[in-house]
Image (tube, rainbow, N blue to C red):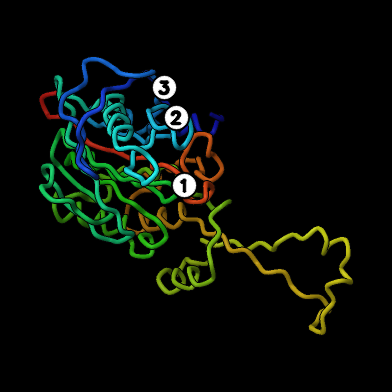
Amino acid sequence: MDAATRELYSATTDRVSGPRRRDCYYGEVPIKVPQKSSGKKSAITILQDNGLAKIPWLLHGFSTRMGGSSRVYGVNSLNLGFTKDDSRSAVERNRTDFLKKLGAVTGKKLWPLVTLRQIHSDLIHCVSEMPKDQLAGDGLITNTPELLLGIQTADCLPVILVDTKHKAVGVFHAGWRGTIKRIVEKGAGEMRRWFGTMPNDIRAVIGPGIHKCCYQVGGEIREQFESQFAYAAELFNETEDYDEVREKYPMLFLTARAPGHSELPKKIFLDLVEANRHQLIAIGISPKNISASPLCTSCHTDMLFSYRAEEGKTGRMMAAVGFKKQNRFI
């Protein structure tokens, strides 16, 4: 990692693996920690925010593609989503190993992992136990200890909110649709409704996702942002296509339109990180309590999964957060 990455994140690596076990399609992982590993062990890397890592009762992490049991997205990759290309057994082992490395273990039992069928919405669920039925939505909140919340991403932003006063946490999936629907803003509101969370008590972390350098969008998306946010102009950047032939032989592209040459179409890029930072600040969270990963998924496919850069055939990372029981950090 470069210096900027080290400044924001601390990466931990370990060699772990586990045997094949049953799993629910989206959420659960095996309850017991495997006693013996099967197959070749591989290094797993979890990214953590330095500020959140200093909170003794908190567990959190952003997975990468490095390590794991999946082979369809590169040898020994840590795919944590049940995609059509990967095997169920590989993903089950990956999820088990991810939780073990994260430390979501009490005795010989792994913490329940709650995830969602993500639908690019603003639906947020407050959970206190493993749901009986699969939940659909894009946000999870809880104040229940030893219950891990997870959101899957492969370009969209994962956002973690931590209420350090009331010991409550939330995790949210913020793509462009969720951002327009103010998913993180509403997430903080739900935490206040359920737990009494106030903006001054929140620490927010925006995990790895696609950045403004690579996130090209259409004009219709910019129009939707402009209809919702007064600061929308700050979120977009335009560049012109470069055509080497056009530059070398401009006379070939003469038209009757002034100033005499046909114009190249402009590319529009969206800063999704800044859009979500704006929302967090707007609800009263101090800028000093908001951090964002410098890692762009599209630029770092050696380390992270990117749906766009890999043309749809890629794995899923996971942002996870939970906390220990009171008597474990007194």
| Callout in the foreground (1, 2) | 1
Q: Amino acid at mark 2?
A: Met
Determine the CA span between mark 3 and mark 1. Answer: 23 Å
Q: Can you identify the residue that label 2 sits on?
A: 66
Compare residues 27 and 145 and report the one nearer the observer. 27
Q: From the top left corner, tell me how far across and down residue 84 is, in percent.
A: 36, 46
Crowd class of label 2 (few under 14; some 14 to 19; many from 20; radius 10 Å): many
Q: From the top left corner, tell me how far across and down residue 235 is, in percent.
A: 51, 61
Determine the CA span between mark 1 and mark 2. Answer: 16 Å
Crowd class of label 3 (few under 14; some 14 to 19; many from 20; radius 10 Å): some
109 vs 312, left or right, is left
Crowd class of label 1 (few under 14; some 14 to 19; many from 20; radius 10 Å): some
Residue 248 visible (yes or no): yes
N-terminal of the pair, mark 1 or mark 2, is 2
Q: Residue at x 53, y 29 (%)?
A: 1
Numbered mark located on residue 43 in the image: 3
Secondary structure of residue under mark 3: strand
Q: Are marks 3 and 2 in contact (CB under 8 Å)?
A: yes
Count of marks overlaid on the render: 3
Q: Residue at x 11, y 44 (%)?
A: 128
Q: Residue at x 24, y 50 (%)?
A: 116
**Which quadrant would residue 78 be assigned to in this image?**
top left
N-terminal of the pair, mark 3 or mark 1, is 3
111 vs 200, left or right, is left
Q: Amino acid at mark 3?
A: Ala
Q: From the top left corner, tell me how far across and down residue 170 is, in percent.
A: 25, 46
Q: Are marks 3 and 1 in contact (CB under 8 Å)?
A: no
Q: Residue at x 17, y 35 (%)?
A: 112
N-terminal of the pair, mark 3 or mark 2, is 3
Q: Can you identify the residue that label 1 sits on?
A: 313
